Image: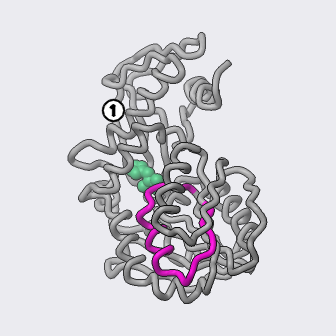
Amino acid sequence: MLSEFGRDMVAALANRPHAISPKYFYDVEGSRLFDRICELPEYYPTRTEIGILERSVGEMAALAGRAAEIVEFGAGSLRKVRMLLGAFEAPARYLPIDISGDHLRDAAAMLRAEFPRLDVVPVVTDYTQHIELPETTGSGRRIGFFPGSTLGNFGPEEALAFLQRAAGLLSGGALLLGADLVKDPQLLHAAYNDAQGVTAAFNLNLLVRANRELGANFVPAQFAHYAFYNAPLQRIEMHLTSRVRQVVALGGERFVLEEGECLHTENSYKFTIDGLRDLAVRAGFRPGPVWTDPQRLFSVHWLHAP
Ligand code: AVI
């Protein structure tokens, strides 16, 4: 029996154009490579968002009020949520939602040690699907936190559906959302084509993972990392292109990839501030303040959930 990853990889190889969800990048090695991407000189989003949070977390804390419950969609690095937990007035609870139980348990243990008065309640689930949260304590507002512009890895319909669900879950509170902005395509191009090749290794690791977990026989050296900015669609596209005609075996089937054929592995949509606010309104939010950096590379939005 093939796993969900296996079924999706078979479907990606069987259908044209070949495409698979970027959620499969994040095995242990993929998560490690992503952490390295966040430190790269070319990858401006992480440090820019952290700078915005540093400058404006006081205003965010005032909007959140006392005894807030912070709901984080995806528990990535703890660095950003620590900033909120340190600045908000007596936060009551932290509910990190992530598909990886191990990762969540480690994160929860660290935060419990650092913030002994905080109730840390990990929720192991795929936050792109339906989410059930424990009853609120009723002590303060529920504030969602979705940093890093991960929203941009959803397609437009998925992004709307996610925001609609988030608006329902956070009713009476708000969502604090990080969104990468449209900008000079050269800067975007460089961010996904770094000189050290870390993004290329992150992309190719999908094939390494498929070999290990699914018994596939991809030869990573026969694929090239290809990332470019699709300006009309306002998105970075990442692909793995076949350097030669090759046959890939997976799940008892064989798939031909012609020379130059692509496996589309990720979209990373970029937003305008107005476009993001319009999307939020369509999802049921009432947009509040927006914070950006002086170069307007990245944006952080306060979205009230009525
Ligand atoms: C997680 N996500 C927001 C990253 C992005 O920029 O879309 C993933 C990434 N892909 C290549 N570099 C970083």
Q: From which residue to which does the magenta span run?
A: 74-95
The residue wearing badge 1 is 224
x 30%, y 62%: residue: 187
Per the image, label 1 sits on a secondary structure element best described as strand
Quadrant of the frame with the N terminus: top right
Q: State left or right for residue 163 relative to residue 132.
A: left
x 55%, y 49%: residue: 105
x 69%, y 65%: residue: 166
Q: State left or right for residue 209 relative to residue 185.
A: right
Quarter-wise, where is residue 225 in the image? top left
Q: Is residue 144 visible?
A: no
Image position of 163 with respect to 2: above or below: below
Depth check, front residue: 296 or 134: 134
Quarter-wise, where is residue 198 in the image? top left
Q: Is residue 89 magenta?
A: yes
Residue 153: x, y in percent? Answer: 53, 53
Depth check, front residue: 224 or 72: 72
Q: Is residue 109 magenta?
A: no
Residue 116: x, y in percent? Answer: 53, 68
Residue 295: x, y in percent? Answer: 32, 77
